[in-house]
Amino acid sequence: LPITDSYPGYLPVSDHISLVCHNGAVLAVLDNGDIYESRDYGLSWQKKEEYNMPDGAGTAHLRTANDEAGYVWLKNIETGEVWRGYFVTD
């Protein structure tokens, strides 16, 4: 299959994707600031509008990590700026 954004449930094409485990799911943070979630180990993905990126991180080249307290860490590769947060959904 060709690489495309038109298949439902797939991650869109992106130059940079950073993955992190959080709350029993895998989150994919794309370089355009969109966040996708997979609850089946990456077989299917859903864009999550309820996750909010910190100001200034929306279109940055990001790397992600998490810690034992449940926080997600984002690092802007270009500037070195770091954010710590906890994604909460309803």
Image (cartoon, rainbow, N blue to C red):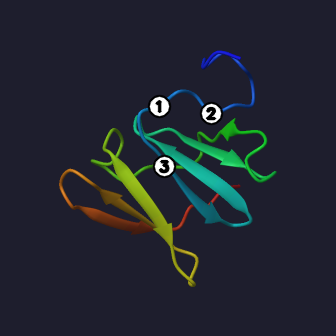
**Marks 1/3: CA–CA distance:** 19 Å
In primary-sequence order, the first of circles 1 and 3 is 1
- Quadrant in which the C terminus is drawn: bottom right
In primary-sequence order, the first of circles 3 and 2 is 2
Which percent across, then down, holds residue 2? 64, 15
Give the labeled residue for mark 2: 11
- Quadrant in which the N terminus is drawn: top right
- Badge 2 element: loop
Q: Up-down: is 61 above or below 80? A: above
User: At x 57% / y 48%, what residue is drawn?
Assistant: 28
User: At x 66% / y 56%, what residue is drawn?
Assistant: 26
Q: Up-down: is 25 above or below 37? A: below
* Residue type for callout 1: Ser
Which percent across, then down, holds residue 19? 55, 54
Give the labeled residue for mark 1: 14
Badges 1 and 3: C-beta atoms under 8 Å apart? no
Q: Estimate how packed mark 2 is, as few (under 14), some (14 to 19) or many (20 or more) residues with alpha carbons within 10 Å.
A: many
User: At x 56% / y 83%, what residue is drawn?
Assistant: 69
Q: Which of marks 1 and 3 is in front?
A: 1
- Label tally: 3
Badges 2 and 1: C-beta atoms under 8 Å apart? yes
Name the foreground residue: 77 vs 48. Answer: 77
Q: Answer with left or right where residue 14 lies relative to residue 58.
A: right
Q: Answer with left or right where residue 2 lies relative to residue 44.
A: left
* Residue type for callout 3: Asn
- Badge 3 element: loop
Give the labeled residue for mark 3: 52
**Marks 2/1: CA–CA distance:** 8 Å
* Residue type for callout 2: Leu
Which percent across, then down, holds residue 86? 53, 67
